[in-house]
Image (cartoon, rainbow, N blue to C red):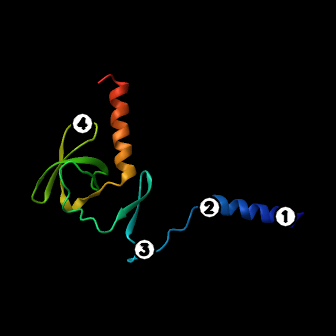
Amino acid sequence: MTNRIVRALLRFRDLFSPPVPAAPCAAHPFAVTFGAHGINLIPRDTDPSDPSAGSYVVDTDRDLIGQVMGVDGARLRLRPPAGGRTWEAEAQNVRPATGAEELSAKVRAVNGRRRWGK
């Protein structure tokens, strides 16, 4: 009876223990980052220093997602997806937003407009 209880407890522990992060592999096509929304996979072949206008990026200094309004050398002009005040960020301090981050920001913007009657 005790062995069955011990085995059940070990299985329970394995189910709810946090996963061990794998070591990064240079051959893997995605870079793995951990953010507020969970695990993000970023394609390695993207060049974060050259985002185009209209694309979504994450400002790593402020930990905010923004839409690129313009590029002026090494500085980007970003605005929140829901609208609001723009800010500037250095191109070296931004990374492309993942699909999940971009979708989440767009849904928040739509829900905010609907909720407040805008």
- Any mark on residue 24, and which? 3
Q: Earlier in the sequence, mark 3 or mark 1?
A: 1
Q: Earlier in the sequence, mark 3 or mark 4?
A: 3
Indicate left or right for 97 with 76 as reference: right
Indicate left or right for 21 with 40 as reference: right
Identify which amino acid the numbered label 1 is placed on: Arg
Residue marked by disc 1: 4
- Any mark on residue 83, and which? 4
Residue marked by disc 2: 17
Between marks 2 and 3, how big is the CA–CA gap?
21 Å
Identify which amino acid the numbered label 3 is placed on: Pro
Residue 10 percent location from the top left of the image: 73, 65
Q: Earlier in the sequence, mark 2 or mark 3?
A: 2
The vertical placement of 114 against 55, above or below, is above
Between marks 2 and 4, how big is the CA–CA gap?
40 Å
Marks 3 and 1 close (CB-CB < 8 Å): no
Between marks 3 and 4, how big is the CA–CA gap?
36 Å
Q: Earlier in the sequence, mark 1 or mark 2?
A: 1
